[in-house]
Amino acid sequence: MLADKPDFFGEFEAKMRAAGVREAAIRAFQHSYQSLRAGDTGLIPEESIRAVDALPHLDEVETSTQIQTELLSQAVVIKLNGGLGTSMGLERAKSLLKVKNDLSFLDFIVQQVLHARDQHRLPLAFVLMNSYSTSQDTLEFLRKYPELGQLNQVELLQSQAPKVEAQSIRPVTWPPNPQLEWCPPGHGDIYPSLLGSGLLDQWLREGRKYLFVSNSDNLGASLNLRVLSYFAASGKPFVMEVAERTASDSKGGHLARRGERFLLRESAQCPKADQPFFQDVRKHRFFNTNNLWIRLDSLKQLLEKHGGFVPLPLIKNEKTVDPRDPNSPPVFQLETAMGAAIQCFENAGALIVPRSRFAPVKTTADLLALRSDAYEVTEDWRVVLSGRNSQPPPAIDLDPNHYKLVDQLDEKLVEGIPSLKHCQELSVRGPVLFNSGNVFRGKVLIVNSSGTLRSLPAGEYADCSRQL
């Protein structure tokens, strides 16, 4: 039992202080470490929660249009920008990946902010939450947008946490590459980082009230005035935007209730025996878009109540200290999820939003869909589903042996991007060279069993299977 082992938090604290980690982040790590020692697995059994049956829908709530500009002057936008996209073979900030019309995520994000500032004639507050891995590349890229403001004013730097040696639960040491002794603490780190950086207190002094946070790889998540108006009028300290789950969302986290409070359950927090319940999208109907709205004064009160951190549930990831070396020492990476704070705020809420506010890129299949005509760019620089009304995006299944990495996808698209606007499902097996004359409708399967790259002839493919 881990509880039987000595408490080595003092070693972690000394290591973090030597690395310049802020006090609030140290207290947050302490909470996670003590949860680990107490035997907290972070698991949320099905029997301990109940499903969420009904929620307000943005299309049905009444919102005020008269005070939107005033509300916007009191708002802050943060984009989470700490990821590298290593699962897709990227080595720089994922937000620098070109996703549509030769523009990157970050291009679209900046244009959204600049458009809002110009349209409403006010300096909308905007910050990127970078990690140590993404900071330099991101700030260098932003030099092309001097109108955005001084670079040191648009960055919130995420903290870092020591990896825990699994057997001893002491700080792991790895002389071949000491940087591998550290890991990102998850986006739940945003709360102690806001406090430790001084930004939270600064915004409160400036009269800021409302914080909107979303992922940089979700281009549908711009600051929406109707949602802002609803949030302000609700009086709630925390509101999560959720969308209705479909079969393609069955492995993503879902909203639930424990007692009167909401909670968020991620896949890693679900016992294996309960996975069928977790993936039942008819029972657990709503997933977290990671678009969050937070009252800054309420966040300040919650942080003060708990000594400078939000007591988020532990997510224990079991890894090796060198992820590329399975024989290196096993470690625990202690992480927290930003959305899990919904259970920490009394009277927190959730709001169903259209699918258009959720267009993330987690895989090359998502990237193919986003680059295609299934998505279009709006006047305010959002990227939304094109003419699909309430229908979900095309479900794309690409052969991982040939499409897992962005470079692999790019080489299959050198002759153009196929049309997916009217496609429901596309499955591809084997290496296939697409072109701009390929039009997919309904459910389509393309198979190339040769193992050698072959071209798919131009033409329309509707509800069919095609062998090359």
Image (tube, rainbow, N blue to C red):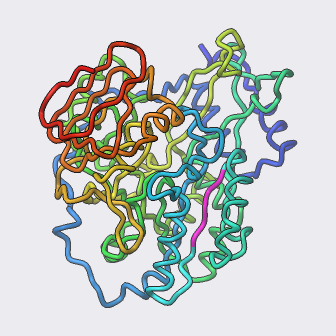
Q: Residue at x 58, y 58 (%)?
A: 303
386 in magenta? no
Question: Which quarter of the rendering shows the N terminus?
Answer: top right
* Left or right: 203, with 377 as reference point: right
Span highlighted in magenta in the image: 126-130
Rendered position, 72 above or below 325:
below
Query: Most prominent secondary structure in the magenta stretch?
Result: strand
Work out which quarter of the rendered image holds the C terminus and state it. Answer: top left
Residue 114 or 294: which is nearer the viewer? Answer: 114
Q: Residue furthest top?
A: 327
User: Toward the viewer: 22 or 361?
Assistant: 361
128 magenta-colored: yes
Q: Position of residue 101 (x, y in %)?
A: 45, 59
Which residue is at 70% across, 67% downward? 143
Establish if 141 lies above or below 85: below
Q: Position of residue 120 (x, y in %)?
A: 45, 87
- Residue sitting at x 14%, y 39%: 442
Which is more toward the observer, 398 or 338? Answer: 398
Q: Is residue 43 placed above or below 369 in the rendered structure?
A: above
Q: Is residue 51 visible?
A: no
Can residue 392 be seen here? The reply is yes
